[in-house]
Image: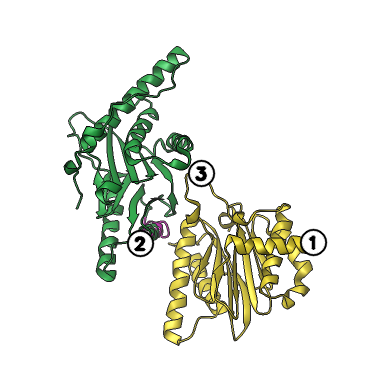
Amino acid sequence: ENSGTAVGIKCTDGIVVAVGKSQASKMLVAGSNRRVFGVDAHTGIAVTGYAADGRQVVNRAREEAQSYKDTYGHEIVPSVLNNRLSLFMHYFTMYGSLRPFGASAIIASYDQDLKMPELYMIDPSGSGYRFHACAAGKGSNAANTELEKLLNRCGDEGITTKDAVKELGRILHIIRDTSKEKPLELEMGWLCAESGFKHALVPKALVAEADEAGKAALAGATIAAAGGGGNGGGATTTTSTAAAEEKSAMEVEE
Amino acid sequence: MKAATSGGNTAIAVRGAKSAAFIVQKKIPDRLVDPTSITSIYRITDSVGCLMLGLPADVRSQVERLRYEANEFAFTNGYPQPAHVLAKRMADLCQVHTQEASSRAMACVMLIIGADDEKGAQCLKVDPAGHFLPYKAVSTGKYEPEAMNFLEKKVTELEALDADGTVEMAIQAMQHVLSSDFKANEIEVGVVTTDSKFKLLTAAQVDQRLNAISDRSDN
């Protein structure tokens, strides 16, 4: 519960996951201390909690995906990966000689048979459910509230991945207590229809925009709070058509 | 044991001569969860189904083990594992966890129903201590005492019930303990008979049973 917050949301055209990391020190190179990992071509996992435990969970996910591919000749199905990883994490809760993983995993994946993106979250006890939107880690309560509000606002139409990138950035900023915490570094991954639902890190430009939107929202919120009124933290952002066209800049995780 | 039934749900299982059914409430914890991924009822084989209440992770692990055991039995012995044999096996496994110092008991209660040509329909309950018994009707969870009371009064009628009858008896028991009517999408119902495979009833099929019950009570 002391690490950053991870959030994920299922969109009409894919899934976006984001982790808000506290910059432990200014000496750290931006982009180090990874929390969002690729597991297979169409699957990514965001972890929160002990980073080392999270990495182990991701390693196991990668092994499961690989062995499934070898055995069945088909990329691992999201519900199966959820099942395997849940059972794996549960195993460590069973025996006295082992300790549970101090990490939660948010699985973003695309089911090629159902042709639907699926979002799962597994907590340290090993219980994994499918979500429309989920949050884990330090600010998960506040984030869950914000996500519910977001889902209510979007209603049946849902949200697109591009909007979700901005919204998640905004949520990760406003749930923090900026006076007490270190600056936020955003790490985001997505599966979106345009890229054939392959998992990738969100292009830096879009992440930066989400970051700015988040900071503006935070500033708006504090002004509103101080002024006792106002627009409640909504922020206007520049349209991202130029950045969105740079699909070639996407990094694909092996 | 308390952890297994602290979920707030109630489950009821009923067996007739050739058919067995169980019913459980379907509660969605919050709006963010995808409701289709929440279930307490699991198909183990074509002839055996299981309803589990308890810690979700333990439930999932036990379901995997049930499926493994059932398939292993069928492979080794060449015929589908009867429900009571499977229940005994799972009960033994639960007991081992209570005796080994380094492991903890699985916090889940299982209601196993099955039907085969040897014994007809069966209904058994396995608890974390490794204790199991076959039942004509049983319940577990939050409203266990009230449901058991209701079922005890009806126990003589149970043998004569057909597939629809066992489902309706289970639904009536649930209505009685919850003291309210519910819609088809607030409950899950599983049925198995000697003539048909284990299946989860669709909302439409549950509605048919609910309508049949209310028509009878109107008469």
The amino acid on which the numbered mark 1 sits, given as a three-letter code, is Ser
- Magenta-drawn stretch contains B61: no
Q: Residue B122 in the image: x percent, y percent?
A: 62, 76
Q: Residue at x 53, y 47 (%)?
A: B29
Q: Residue at x 26, y 51 (%)?
A: A196
The image quadrant of residue A231 is top left
Q: Which residue is mark 1?
A: B217
Please rate how many residues cluster around mark 3, counting C-alpha atoms within 10 Å: few if below 14, some from 14 to 19, many from 20: some
B89 above or below A58?
below
- Same subunit, labels 2 and 1: the answer reads no
Instruction: Spot the residue most to the top.
Output: A227
Cα–Cα gap, marks 2 and 1: 45 Å
The amino acid on which the numbered mark 2 sits, given as a three-letter code, is Asp
- Same subunit, labels 2 and 3: the answer reads no
- Same subunit, labels 3 and 1: the answer reads yes
Q: Which residue is mark 3?
A: B31
Which of these two is toward me, A49 or A144?
Answer: A144
Q: Which chain letter matches label 3? A: B
Q: Residue B64 in the image: x percent, y percent?
A: 44, 67
Magenta region: which residues?
A88-98
3 vs 1, front mark? 1
Please rate how many residues cluster around mark 2, counting C-alpha atoms within 10 Å: few if below 14, some from 14 to 19, many from 20: few
A175 above or below B125?
above
Quadrant where the N terminus of chain A sits is top left
Q: Which residue is mark 2?
A: A113
Q: Are marks 3 and 1 in contact (CB under 8 Å)?
A: no
Chain A drawn in what color? green
Q: Residue A8 in the image: x percent, y percent?
A: 37, 43
Cα–Cα gap, marks 3 and 1: 35 Å
Cα–Cα gap, marks 2 and 3: 26 Å
Q: Which chain letter matches label 2? A: A
Chain B drawn in what color? yellow
